[in-house]
Image (spheres, rainbow, N blue to C red):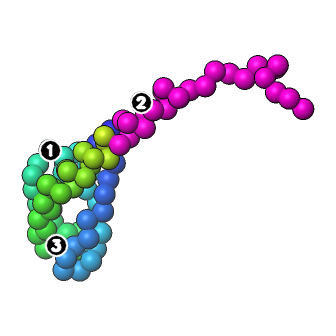
Amino acid sequence: MFEDETIDIACPKCGFKNSLLVREIEQHSETHIVCQGCHVGVKVEASEFQHRLSEINDEVEAMQVEARQSKSPKARKGDFQI
């Protein structure tokens, strides 16, 4: 669902925010990037992110199911009182 979204990873050395696709974090337990600000290597451990993303996906799916179930029928002319 969020695979094509990006997140910003702040470099621990210079604070520069490096963009990373969610897809890259989902596929690997850890990802290595080179900071675009100071060119230092940054290791991104994905386990906590993957766990939280899974929780968010479950919450979104539950809301979608609830929304489909609670759709009310269209209002008709005689349904209103003035």
Crowd rating for badge 2 (residues with CA inside 10 Å; few <14, some 14–19, many 20+): few
Answer left or right for 12 relative to 59. left
Any part of residue 40 in sight = yes
User: In the image, is residue 62 part of the stretch drawn in magenta?
Assistant: yes
Among the two numbered marks 1 and 3 on one chain, the one whose residue lies closer to the N terminus: 1
Q: Alpha-carbon distance for marks 3 and 2?
A: 45 Å
Q: Earlier in the sequence, mark 3 or mark 2?
A: 3
- The answer to whether mark 3 and mark 2 are in CB contact below 8 A is no
**Alpha carbon of mark 1 to alpha carbon of mark 3: how far?**
24 Å
In magenta stretch: residue 77: yes
Q: Which residues are magenta?
A: 59-82
Give the quarter of the image for residue 11.
bottom left
Question: Callout 3, which amino acid?
Answer: His
Residue 6: x, y in percent? 32, 53
User: Relative to the observer, which residue lies in front, 74 or 6?
Assistant: 74
Residue 5, given in percent of the width and then of the height, sits at 34, 48
Q: Amino acid at mark 1?
A: Gln
Q: In the rendered image, which quarter is residue 77 located in?
A: top right
Task: Tell me the tag on residue 27.
Answer: 1
Circle 2 residue: 65
Q: Which residue is mark 3?
A: 39
Give the mark toward the camera: 2 or 1: 2
